[in-house]
Image: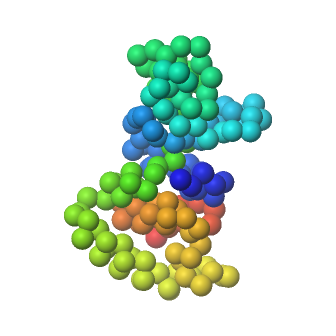
Amino acid sequence: MDTSEQYIKMCDDQYIQDLWTPADWDTCYCKSKEQQNEDEQVVVLSGYETDSGCYGHETPERTDNYYWSVCGETEELFHSLHIWLPRQDQLQAMIEPSPSEFMCEFTEWYYKHDELVPIGINTYCEQFKTMEQLWLAFVMKEKYSKQWNGEEWKNG
């Protein structure tokens, strides 16, 4: 699972975050831990009562809305304090076609980006260091016509 600074930055986009309904085993970056200068800022929504529902968070007890109780009382506050880091399977589920169609579309997209070469990078796709980064770039292109320029998503 990619938890790099680059992937966190790529995921910190309203298009992706609006797709998130927190669920067990989701991974997210906790902004409140960053503000507290804590070492472990990536947490997993575990669903276990022994860790109050979030591995990496400490809360006194689990409630019916335990995700929200981890860092606040409301879903809105929880979302404002966390950046969802989708796993590869979650990214792939964002694109609708069958697996064979999906792989054809992905392969076609991957090999068509030579004309978008940023300076110092051989191809557009080579700037992505993990499969999550690569799949996120594909999802953003397919769903929102966005391209990563190394700093942010731009229309393209």
Look at the image and name its color scheme: rainbow
Query: Does 56 sit left or right of 27 as displayed?
Result: right
Residue at the outermost front position: 50
Depicted 117 relative to depicted 59: above or below? below
**Quadrant in the picture for residue 30:** top right
**Quadrant in the picture for residue 98:** bottom left
Residue 113 seen: yes
Nearer to me, 123 or 76? 123
Residue at the outermost left position: 98
Query: Does 10 sit left or right of 20 as displayed?
Result: right
**Quadrant in the picture for residue 40:** top right
- The residue at the point 63 percent across, 58 percent down is 6
On the image, the x and y values in percent for residue 105 come to 31, 73
On the image, the x and y values in percent for residue 84 come to 51, 43
Numbered marks: total: 0
On the image, the x and y values in percent for residue 116 come to 52, 81
- The residue at the point 43 percent across, 77 percent down is 110
Depicted 31 relative to depicted 70: above or below? below
- The residue at the point 61 percent across, 41 percent down is 42
Nearer to me, 97 or 140? 97
Residue 81 seen: no
On the image, the x and y values in percent for residue 100 come to 24, 70
Depicted 136 relative to depicted 44: above or below? below
- The residue at the point 52 percent across, 62 percent down is 133
